[in-house]
Image (tube, rainbow, N blue to C red):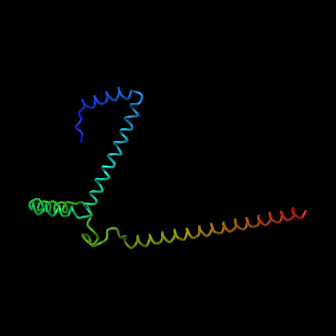
Amino acid sequence: MFDLGWSELLVIGIVALIVVGPKDLPVLFRNVGRFMGKARGMAREFSRAMNDAADESGMRDVAKTFKSATNPLGSAMDGVRDAARSMTDPTPPKKGEGLKEDPGALDPERAAQKKKIEAGAARAAAERQKREAEAAAKRAEESARKAEEMEAALKKDGEA
């Protein structure tokens, strides 16, 4: 954008030091940095908006089509490159391709053990919830009894 070398920056820095003074120079540089950051952010946002607009209008697809039409050798090489990449791609094949047996499936004995463990855990959780509910009911009964005792004591004090 601006073609400033080290010598030009040094001259600008010395002039700024003389004009602004050493006390306010850090504040000036901080404000200039903030301004530059905001300007770069706005430029980045503008570029992104223009790229999104070009994507929505299909401009890149048209440009790619023209490129492939004007450069058939390049588009053929792209096809070869994609084919080679798919042959050497270490990602696992999609479901339904490759192995016929599910390697993650458990054998029947382990599946039965898994079901027993899950059933035991569910039973233990249900028993724990039952105990907690009973304890909560006891606490509620005690609180109600205490409230009744306090109300009775208030009535006695009010009568006396």
- Left or right, residue 69 beside residue 154: left
Residue beneath the point at 33% across and 42% down: 36
**Quarter residue 83 falls in:** bottom left
Query: Residue 146: percent from the left, percent from the top?
Result: 77, 64
Residue 105: name its quadrant. Answer: bottom left
In which quarter of the view is residue 154 placed?
Answer: bottom right
Residue 151 location (% of width, % of height)? 80, 65
Q: Position of residue 117 (x, y in %)?
A: 48, 69
Q: Residue 52 or 113: which is nearer the viewer?
A: 52
Query: Which image quarter is the N terminus in?
Result: top left
Residue sitting nearer the eye, 114 or 39: 39
Residue depicted at x 74% and y 67%: 144
Image point (14%, 62%), residue name? 66
**Callout count:** 0
70 relative position to 122: left or right: left
User: Residue 80 location, x and y as percent?
Assistant: 13, 61
- The residue sitting at 72% across, 68% down in the picture is 141
The residue positioned farthest toward the front in the image shown: 19
The quarter of the rendered structure image containing the C terminus is bottom right
Lateral position of residue 114 relative to residue 125, left or right: left
